[in-house]
Amino acid sequence: MAESDNADDLKKKFAEALGAKKSNDTDSSTASDKGPGHAHDVHGQADQKRVFRRKSG
């Protein structure tokens, strides 16, 4: 009986955490405060042809 109580308690905690996460994701007022989303051009130019070489050794 103690295992089922622990399992129910754990499920309740996970459900509350998921609900909090979902409410934070949908909050539009904080989304604009975070600044720009993804970094652009972090790897340099992508239009160059890539060169693949065998590993020697």
Image (cartoon, rainbow, N blue to C red):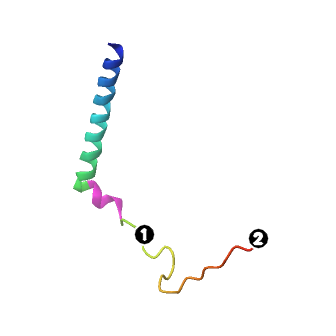
Amino acid type assigned to the residue bearing label 2 in the image: Gly
The disc at residue 55 is none
Give me the residue at 28% from left, 54% from top.
30
The magenta stretch is: 30-35
Q: Which residue is mark 1?
A: 39
Q: How many marks?
A: 2
Task: Tell whether 28 sits left or right of 2.
Answer: left
Q: Quadrant of the C terminus?
A: bottom right
Amino acid type assigned to the residue bearing label 1 in the image: Ala
What's the distance in space between the residues labelled 1 and 2, CA to CA? 37 Å
To which quarter of the image does residue 35 belong? bottom left
Position of residue 57 relative to residue 46, above or below, is above
Q: Earlier in the sequence, mark 1 or mark 2?
A: 1
Give me the residue at 31% from left, 19% from top.
4
Q: Is disc 1 surrounded by few (<14), some (14 to 19) or many (20+) residues within 10 Å?
A: few
Residue 8 location (% of width, % of height): 29, 24
- Name the residue at the right extreme: 57
Q: Quadrant of the N terminus?
A: top left
Q: Which residue is mark 2?
A: 57
Question: Does the magenta segment cover residue 21?
Answer: no
Residue 9 location (% of width, % of height): 31, 24
